[in-house]
Amino acid sequence: MELKPGARLRSVVCATEVIVVAGAGDVDVRCGGLPMVTVEVAPSTDDVPIPGMDTGTQLGKRYTSESGSPELLCTKAGKGTLAIGATPLDLKEAKPLPSSD
């Protein structure tokens, strides 16, 4: 799938929806083990996440690969695991604020 910042994607196996925050190009973005689709495509209720790809997503959290691209913001939580191909994305941690001594 060709990604660009601002693109909205939906899982076909759960309620997960994301917005691409950073990164562009042809990327195999998956949720629950199956490719994600644009939000214009109606969700399917027949599919379920593949075992091992069902750890879920958290609303308002950012997910990224080890390389940092792409970065996805979860706008609707679900049961599937976000991944690039078969590699699960990592939850992006907040940067610590500097001390104000």
Image: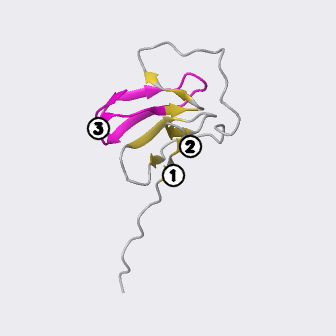
Q: Is residue 10 shown in magenta?
A: yes
Residue at image point 48% right, 47% down = 61
Q: Which residue is mark 3?
A: 24
Circles 2 and 1 in contact, beta carbons < 8 Å: yes
Q: Quadrant of residue 50?
A: top right
Q: Amino acid at mark 2?
A: Gln
Q: From mark 1 to mark 3, how far is it between C-alphas?
A: 19 Å
Within-10-Å neighbours for mark 2: few <14, some 14–19, many 20+: some
> Which badge, 1 or 3, is on the more N-terminal residue?
3
Q: Is residue 25 left or right of residue 27?
A: left
Q: Is residue 45 left or right of residue 21?
A: right
Which stretch is magenta?
A: 1-29
Circles 3 and 2 in contact, beta carbons < 8 Å: no
Please tell me whether residue 10 is drawn above or below residue 74 in the rendered image. Answer: above
Q: From mark 3 to mark 2, how far is it between C-alphas?
A: 23 Å
Within-10-Å neighbours for mark 3: few <14, some 14–19, many 20+: some
Within-10-Å neighbours for mark 1: few <14, some 14–19, many 20+: some
> Which badge, 2 or 1, is on the more N-terminal residue?
2
Q: Amino acid at mark 3?
A: Ala
Q: Which residue is mark 2?
A: 58
Residue at image point 38% right, 71% down = 97
Secondary structure of the residue carrying numbered label 1: strand
The x and y percentages for residue 40 are 41, 15
> Which badge, 3 or 2, is on the more N-terminal residue?
3
Q: Is residue 27 left or right of residue 74?
A: left
Q: Amino acid at mark 1?
A: Leu
Residue at image point 43% right, 32% down = 28
For this orientation, the residue located farthest to the right is: 51
Q: Which residue is mark 1?
A: 91
The x and y percentages for residue 25 are 29, 35
Please tell me whether residue 41 is drawn above or below residue 24 in the rendered image. Answer: above
